[in-house]
Image: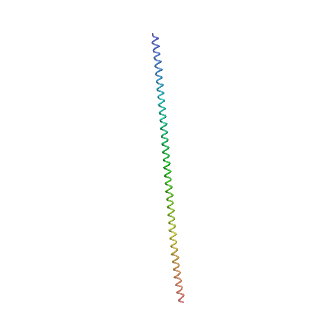
Amino acid sequence: MKKLLFSAALLLAISVTFTSCREEAEKTGDAIENAAEATGDAVEATGDAIESAGEAVGDAANDAVDAAGDVATDAVDAAGNAVDAVKEGAKDAANTVEDGAKKAVDATKETAKDAANALKKEADKL
């Protein structure tokens, strides 16, 4: 009877050991699956973050290009305005010189007439 009781206890101990190991193996398998799912979620979140960062960089680059284009356009407009101002200034200077030259010619003609008249008067006196 002692052997029978001892054999039953041994069988019970072995069956409990195998059953508990099987449960531990299942728990380990579940833990591995959960870790794999968490890793997949983390990879997906990282991909989304990279995509968002790429879009943000692209938007920033587009904004910078637009701003540079605006600055260039403004610079071209300013240069055009400066050229127009120089043209106007040159035109005004040319008109002023022309008017001065006409006045000088008219004054010279008047002076020449006056001199001619004075010469005639002096000649008539002789």
Q: Report x, y in % for residue 7.
A: 47, 13
Above or below residue 27? Residue 119 is: below
Q: Position of residue 73 (x, y in %)?
A: 50, 56
Above or below 120: residue 59: above
Q: How many labels does the image show?
A: 0
The relative height of residue 88 versus residue 63 in the rendered view (above or below) is below
On the rendered image, what quadrant is the C terminus found in?
bottom right
Residue 12 in the image: state x and y as whole percent.
45, 17
- Residue found at the far top of this picture: 1
Q: Please identify the quadrant where the N terminus is shown.
A: top left
Looking at the picture, how far across and down is residue 27, in whole percent?
Answer: 46, 26
Q: Residue furthest bottom?
A: 126
Identify the coloring: rainbow
